[in-house]
Amino acid sequence: MAGFFSQLKAGLSKTRQNLVERVEELLTGRRKIDEELYEQLEEVLIGADVGFNTSMELVEQLRQEVKARKISEADQLTGILMEQIVSLLGEEKPLLFSAAGPSVFLVVGVNGVGKTTTIGKLAGRLRQEGKRVILAAADTFRAAAIDQLEIWGQRAGAEVIKQREGADPAAVAYDAVNAARSRGIDVVLIDTAGRLHNKVNLMEELRKVRRVIEKEIPGAPHEVLLVLDATTGQNALQQAKLFKEVADVTGIVLTKLDGTAKGGVVLGIQGETKIPVKWIGIGEGMDDLRPFVPRDFAAALFNRPEEGMT
């Protein structure tokens, strides 16, 4: 874990420069806390992809804390801002597994965000934990998606349930959950199409998939995981809002956090959608997808010791 924390700090270096270091530059050598300072802090946060509403809320909370604690030195604000970010991100939210029978995770997201790769890496992690996993190729509109999922299934040691290109996604999901139930499989990961050009069609397709799997396994899906690409910044936030409307998302997987200056979008996503970030990706390797620990993220972002490590 210590190695991963160092990797996380390195991966967040550009976001740190874009957010934390700009805040520190603003506060260094400044004695007076005034309205101009608060406005400049808002500008820094918005520029770091935190999002307009969340930036305004963070600065308003900062203003209240300064007043409540009777703080007069500007250089004390960085520590308070870190406290607020930890509070905003909340506690770690692990994946929810079924107590009996297979756990079914529906994975959604637009094309190009690393959805299929994320499913493969998550399958690999679950296999390392001793779980038996099936992948369902329910993104039937692209032959490449089915082929890619099969490659990741081979890497992870997980069987892939598929049909022909253009088949009914709900039929693939049906086959997968029935295979899982009959074979004593622990987890089913269902890949879905990432089309956004027609929100109504996407909504109906996801509803049909949900109906089918819930009929076969009451309480399923146990998670609806939305995969977002951190490098897209505010686009990721807009995708989170849209999929929250159409897919009853329970958790977010944020990929490509390493090397982007737009990692502040984590705060905007949490602040505006309240959907917990459950996993993050900070590299290309199978082991570079990890559970999201908010305290570790904040400590790495602010270049602090491993405060959140247990």
Image: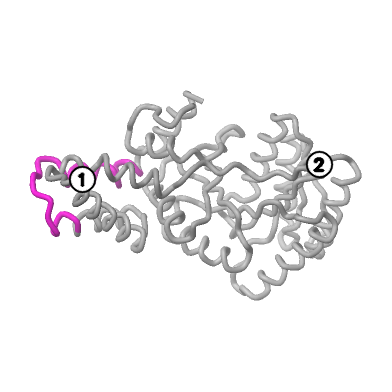
Q: Is residue 97 left or right of residue 243?
A: right
The amino acid type of the residue labelled 2 equals: Glu
User: Looking at the image, is 303 positioned above or below residue 44?
Assistant: above
With 16 as the anchor, is 107 left or right in this view?
right
Q: Give the Cα separation between the discs numbered 1 and 2.
A: 57 Å
Residue 95 versus residue 126: which sits nearer the camera? 95
Residue 304 place in picture, x, y as percent: 33, 31
Q: Residue at x 70, y 43 (%)?
A: 97
Depth check: 295 or 145 in front? 295
Tell me where residue 76 appears, x and y as whole percent.
19, 40
Q: Residue at x 79, y 61 (%)?
A: 165
> Which residue has dot 1 on it?
69
- Label 2 Cα neighbours within 10 Å, binned few <14 / some 14-19 / many ≥20: some
Which numbered dot is residue 159? 2
Q: Give the mark nearest the N terminus, 1 or 2.
A: 1
x and y percent of residue 306 in the render?
A: 40, 27
Q: Main secondary structure of the magenta part?
A: helix
Q: Which amino acid is tagged 1?
A: Arg
At 22% from the left and 44% from the top, the residue drawn is 77
Q: Which mark is residue 216?
A: none
The range drawn in magenta is 15-38
Image label count? 2
Q: Quadrant of residue 242?
A: bottom right
Residue 23 lies within the magenta run: yes
Q: Is residue 236 left or right of residue 117?
A: left
